[in-house]
Image (cartoon, rainbow, N blue to C red):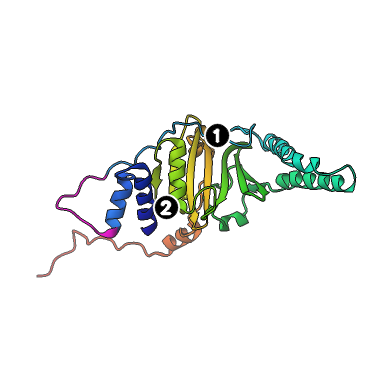
Amino acid sequence: MKAKRLLGAALALGLGLAAITSATVAAAQQKRGTSGASAAAPAKPADTPVTKKTIALTPPGIAWGMTTKQVAAVIDKMLDEAYVPRYKAVSPGVKMRALDAELAEEKSAFRRSRIDFGGLPTGIDATPLKGEYTYLNKESMMTLTRESGKRYFFFIQDKLWKIIDEHPLGEKAARGKDYASAVVKLATAFGVPGRVTPPAPDKGRYGNEVDWKDAATHFRAIERNDSEIAFAYEDLVTLGSLDSLRPNKPVDANAIDPAVASAVRKEEPPPAPPPSADKPGKK
């Protein structure tokens, strides 16, 4: 609750908002136990605000619907360009060959980073990325690791539909000193305040989020911790079709195994028959 109040205060201060969303305020009032003479009907959640500027995907050349091979080719080009200054600083010989090997390894590491979310659990389940993918629905992920941070590319049926970037927070961080200030910067850049959404673990959301969208992309600013924020970019077309693209739903770990439930039902004694209407009463 403290984090939500701080976030709301920062948005109100930076953007002149009277409130963030009626849904968030209502939820906060319920948790604080406040009540009035008459309770207002709960408001419907606000729609995702539309940005006044296009949400750009990077690096240049990346587009929704690309295959893993096509994305790898774009990353190859990006890495080639990133290494140009370093190539200019060395002469042909041992150092240049070492640079060639380093560049080739970065390209190869990106391809090897692919994880397929098949029938077996992965180590990703123990990371903040849990909830961003499902199993047995032809989903996969590739990770680009560089000094600037990590970028995750998510695919469904071998088509790119989501990108998540991790960014540091702090006094000297480009994104802001904390989550609230980072959200204010985003609202200023997009030209409109975002929609605040509280955590909902049952829906795969484990932290506060603020979101926006344009004609093609849904953008989420995800609160990770005091020193990190994540930016998620999602293809709106795929997002609207996720139910059909994910026919295999996650299994509830707390649910009773069907075989056990069936055995329990068989062991239960049959219900006693109702009293017969022909049975004589006491005289």
x, y (%) of residue 167? Answer: 56, 50
Residue 77 colored magenta? Answer: no
**Foreground disc of the pair 2, 1:** 1
Q: Which amino acid does label 1 sit on?
A: Ala
The magenta stretch is 32-42
Residue 234 visible, this angle: yes
x, y (%) of residue 215? Answer: 48, 29
Image position of 2 with respect to 47: above or below: below
Instruction: Examine the residues drawn in magenta and state their main secondary structure.
Output: loop
x, y (%) of residue 24? Answer: 33, 49
Res. 56 mark:
1
Look at 63% across and 33% down and name the residue there. Answer: 60
| Residue at the disc numbered 2 | 199
Mark 1 falls on what kind of element? Answer: loop
Q: Which badge, 2 or 1, is on the more N-terminal residue?
A: 1
Question: Quick check: marks 2 and 1 in contact, CB under 8 Å?
Answer: no
Give left or right: position of 167 versus 76.
Answer: left
Quadrant of the rendered image containing residue 121 = bottom right
Give left or right: position of 179 versus 281.
Answer: right
Mark 2 falls on what kind of element? Answer: loop
Q: Nearer the viewer, residue 278 or 16?
A: 16
Quadrant of the rendered image containing residue 22 = top left
Q: Nearer the viewer, residue 209 or 182?
A: 182
